[in-house]
Structures are given as structure tokens and as C-alpha cells.
Image (spheres, rainbow, N blue to C red):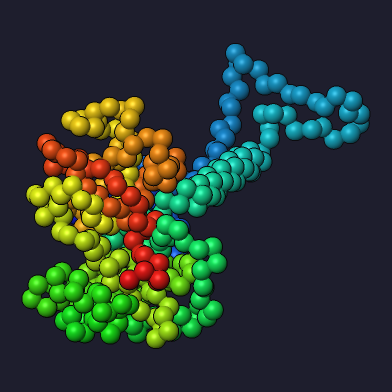
């Protein structure tokens, strides 16, 4: 399922910053990485309007009286015979007509300018309300998951971070830089939470112990923190221009990085899960979106609700099913306006499964890809 990468160059009309965007963003809204101005990428069928309308001067041609067409004159009604006559239509000066033409053109330009400004403002408002602005630097076409998660059974009185954003950013930036420059598992362990649990997962994830560091090219690129309880998330940009969220956990030892959500760790590999078809549940981090696909053991549309489940790297995709009318189905169901959502789910195959692309959703582990700090 490797997606093609297609890019186009774009120049910010405000700060003249040159950057690139995926070609499928034509006609959509973006944010300039330099000046943060909200822009709109023209679609291929758009015709850019001129910046100013050309002023056309009206040149009046003096009519030439002929014998067949006598010259007519007109006086204002009620004008005393002894007063000065008003100039007739034929005798009005060229300058007067030209001035009226220029005023007409100016009025048209003002109307056109006001209309264009109203359209721009309306577009900005619609863009901000819809929230469809997409990072111009993201290379992978996999939906960026919501990092901050809410585990099932979370206490409403869960502890929260007592520090300000400036203090958190000052501590998080060097930590993120070390994390993204680490070349071995040993380099990562002091930076992550629950290293005693995460080490075994890392050794399995990096079989030879070596890591190709992505590097840090931009920190807090979205210029905002998301704080929930003891979890802090923000966006970073790697050296290959991949913009991704990263989660920090506030611990007694200071901030620590949630490695599992960064790599999209699962209890077993997708390849092993799909080939062995286990009937016992295993936890996976997935991006879920509603679909209408009913087949084989899940052909009863009145009983099952179907979803597409995509792995964090976008390389694997299965159909997940949950029984309609259950509490689990109500918890999983996204809002009507939500196209996809990041979840941690326990998945299993049904008994005597005939399809390797249809699984049953056993339970929801967390809303998002980060478990609560109390969980290892």
C-alpha cells in the first residue's frame, strides 16, 4: 500500500517563502510554514483574477452634423431666457465624458475589490471552522493519529501537570533532540518511560540494536501544546520533512517520551498476526474509519458494524467488526463529522476464519495511542 509521493512548489505571496506541498492539496487550504499565514493552493482549473482592473478611458467622438441630421440643442426647463444656457448634449466637452468614464471604472473596481475581499474572508472562516488545514511538510499520506489518549476507566480526578508551557517546552526540546538522534537502544532507554518494560519491546523492534536516527529539523512546529493529565504532546519535524506528533509523560524523574506511540508498537507484528490468525486478542495501535463491507462470517449487516483498520505505517489494512447495539460499539463509533480516529484496540480472528483481512474488535484499550501514565 505504498503511496506515491507527488509534490508541487509554492511561493507564499506574503513572505515569499518557497516550500512544497502534495499535489492533491490543489484547491485546499494550507498554512505557510514561515509566516503562518492561511493560504489557498489554486486548483488546476482555477484562473487567478487580475490584481487590478485596467482603466479604460472613454474617448468621445464629436458627432459631425449633416444636412440630413440637424444639430439639436436642449435647454433646462425653467431656465430664465436671460440666463446662461446649459451646454447641449452635443457640445459637452471631452474632459467631462472622460471623467465620468473614469469614475464609473473606479466604482466597478471598488465593487470588485470588496467582493474579492468578502470571498477571501469567507474562505478563511470556512477553512478555520472545518479544520482541514494540513501540514505542508508531511511526506507520508497516512492520517496523523491523535497522540493524547484517554484510557478506559480514567479517573476524572487524574493528576495534571502543574508547570507552565514555557517550562515544559524548555525541558522537552533537548529531550526530543536526544531521542531523535539516538542510534542504539541503549541511547533510548534513559529517555523513555518504563524502560524496564520498554527495553524488551525495543529489542524486538530493533533486532540488531541499531537505529537510523531521523534527526530533529523542527520543534513544536504547530506552535501549541496539547496537555491532558500527565501527558503532553506537540509536533516535531524530522530531517526528511516528516511532521509527526510526539508524546511526553510527566514523571517524578521529569519528562519522558512515550516510545510506543512514536513507533506505533503492537503486541505482535502485523505479519505474524495476519498469517497465524490467533483467536486470542492482541493489542494494536490503529487508525479507524467507518466503511460498509460485509462478507464471509460478517455478512449480516444488521448484526455487525464494519470499520477499516490501518496500521501506523500504512502498510497493513484489515476490516474490523463489532456487534451493533453493544456498549463497545457505542464507544468505538466516531462522530458523524470524524473521518478517522486513532485507537488502541484488542483484535482477534474468529474461529475457523476463512479471510485474513477480517477481524473482530474484542475491546477498546485507549482512545488514542498513548496509555495513561499509571499503565506500564
Image-based side of 232 in relation to 210, left or right = right
**Residue 213 percent location from the top left of the image:** 19, 77
Name the residue: 61% across, 23% down: 65
Can residue 325 be seen by looking at this rendering? Answer: yes
Which one is in front, 136 or 169? 169
Image location (x, y in percent) of residue 118: 56, 46
Q: In the visual, does 325 lie left or right of 267?
A: right
Q: Residue at x 60, y 13 (%)?
A: 68
Q: How many marks?
A: 0
- Near-viewer residue (252 or 257): 252
Q: Quadrant of residue 91?
A: top right
Depth check: 311 or 320 in front? 320
Residue under the image location 39 percent in, 44 percent down:
328
Quarter holding the C terminus? Answer: bottom left
Question: Could you say where residue 44 lies in the image, as x and y percent from the top left?
Answer: 30, 43
Give how far across and how far down residue 73 sits, in percent.
Answer: 74, 24
Q: Residue at x 51, y 42 (%)?
A: 56
From this view, report whether residue 149 is shown above or below residue 66. Answer: below
Q: Can residue 234 be seen at all in this image of the molecule?
A: no
Amino acid at each position: 500500500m505504498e503511496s506515491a509521493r507527488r509534490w508541487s512548489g509554492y511561493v507564499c505571496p506574503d513572505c515569499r517563502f518557497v516550500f512544497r506541498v502534495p499535489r492533491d492539496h490543489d484547491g485546499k487550504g494550507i498554512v505557510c510554514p514561515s509566516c503562518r499565514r492561511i493560504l489557498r493552493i489554486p486548483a488546476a482549473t482555477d484562473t487567478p483574477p487580475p490584481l487590478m482592473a485596467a482603466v479604460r478611458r472613454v474617448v468621445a467622438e464629436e458627432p459631425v452634423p449633416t444636412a440630413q441630421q440637424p444639430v439639436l440643442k436642449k435647454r433646462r426647463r425653467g431656465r430664465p431666457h436671460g440666463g446662461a444656457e446649459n451646454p447641449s448634449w452635443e457640445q459637452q466637452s471631452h474632459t467631462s465624458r472622460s471623467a465620468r468614464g473614469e469614475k464609473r471604472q473606479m466604482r466597478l473596481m471598488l465593487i470588485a475589490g470588496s467582493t474579492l475581499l468578502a470571498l477571501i474572508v469567507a474562505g478563511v472562516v470556512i477553512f478555520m471552522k472545518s479544520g482541514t488545514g494540513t501540514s505542508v511538510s508531511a511526506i507520508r499520506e497516512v492520517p496523523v493519529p491523535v497522540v493524547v489518549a484517554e484510557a478506559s476507566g480514567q479517573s476524572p480526578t487524574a493528576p495534571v501537570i502543574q508547570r507552565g508551557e514555557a517550562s515544559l517546552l524548555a525541558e522537552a526540546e533537548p529531550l526530543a533532540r536526544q531521542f531523535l538522534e539516538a542510534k542504539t537502544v541503549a541511547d533510548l532507554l534513559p529517555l523513555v518511560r518504563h524502560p524496564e518494560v520498554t527495553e524488551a519491546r525495543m529489542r524486538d523492534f530493533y533486532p540488531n540494536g541499531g537505529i537510523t536516527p531521523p534527526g530533529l529539523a523542527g520543534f513544536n512546529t504547530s506552535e501549541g501544546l496539547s496537555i491532558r493529565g500527565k501527558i503532553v504532546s506537540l509536533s516535531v519535524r524530522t530531517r526528511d520533512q516528516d511532521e509527526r506528533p510526539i508524546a511526553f509523560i510527566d514523571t517524578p524523574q521529569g519528562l519522558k517520551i512515550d516510545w510506543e506511540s512514536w513507533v506505533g508498537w503492537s503486541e505482535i507484528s502485523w505479519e505474524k498476526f495476519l498469517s497465524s490468525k490467533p483467536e486470542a486478542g492482541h493489542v494494536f495501535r490503529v487508525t479507524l474509519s467507518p466503511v460498509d463491507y460485509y462478507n464471509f462470517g460478517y455478512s449480516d449487516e444488521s448484526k455487525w458494524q464494519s470499520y477499516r483498520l490501518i496500521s501506523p505505517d500504512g502498510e497493513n489494512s484489515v476490516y474490523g467488526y463489532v456487534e451493533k447495539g453493544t456498549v463497545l460499539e457505542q464507544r468505538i463509533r466516531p462522530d458523524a463529522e470524524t473521518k478517522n480516529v486513532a485507537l488502541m484496540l484488542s483484535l482477534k480472528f474468529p474461529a475457523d476464519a476463512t479471510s485474513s483481512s477480517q477481524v473482530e474488535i474484542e475491546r477498546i484499550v485507549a482512545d488514542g495511542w498513548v496509555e495513561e501514565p499509571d499503565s506500564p
